[in-house]
Image (cartoon, rainbow, N blue to C red):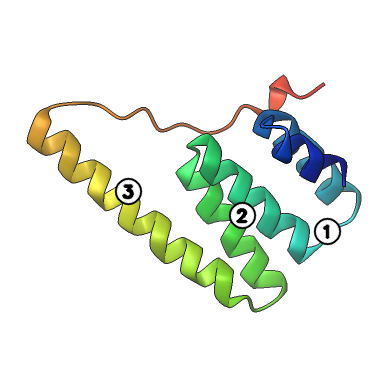
Amino acid sequence: KAALKASDDGDNAAAACLLKAAFETKEDATTAYDLAGILEGLGDLDGAIAWNERTIEMKKNKYATAAIERITARKAEIAVFEKTYGAKYKLGAYDFAACK
């Protein structure tokens, strides 16, 4: 609940930390899926895909499957944007070391 409140308050970094800590305490498909969504919102597209895949490994989830498809399509769109305009979109893994 604390992670959802943090997310509702706009603090997705705190939500990511809380969800990862919750997952480390008890591996749960719902927590993995929620973490994937938060990471996607933070721009960690590879991390979001990985956590959606982890969700599916634990429990078949059509929403996680759809999220992987959506994120993969977004990554392709970013690649076209970068190639067309020579711009760089910063994609990077969320730094969980920042969690307190």
The residue to which callout 2 is attached is: 51
Cα distance in 3D space between marks 1 and 3: 28 Å
Answer left or right for 73 relative to 6: left
Quarter of the image with the C terminus is: top right
The residue to which callout 3 is attached is: 75
The residue at the point 33 percent across, 51 percent down is 74
The residue to which callout 1 is attached is: 27
Based on the displayed image, in which of its 4 quarters is residue 3 positioned?
top right
Disc 2 is placed on an element classified as: helix
Callout count: 3
Single out the mark in the foreground, 1 or 3: 3
The residue at the point 12 percent across, 37 percent down is 83
The residue at the point 60 percent across, 51 percent down is 37
Kindly identify the amino acid type of the residue bearing the numbered disc 3: Lys
Answer left or right for 72 relative to 33: left
Answer left or right for 16 relative to 66: right
Disc 1 is placed on an element classified as: loop
Image location of residue 8, percent across then percent down: 72, 40
Kindly identify the amino acid type of the residue bearing the numbered disc 1: Glu
Cα distance in 3D space between marks 1 and 2: 12 Å
Decide which of 9, 88 is in the foreground and name it: 9
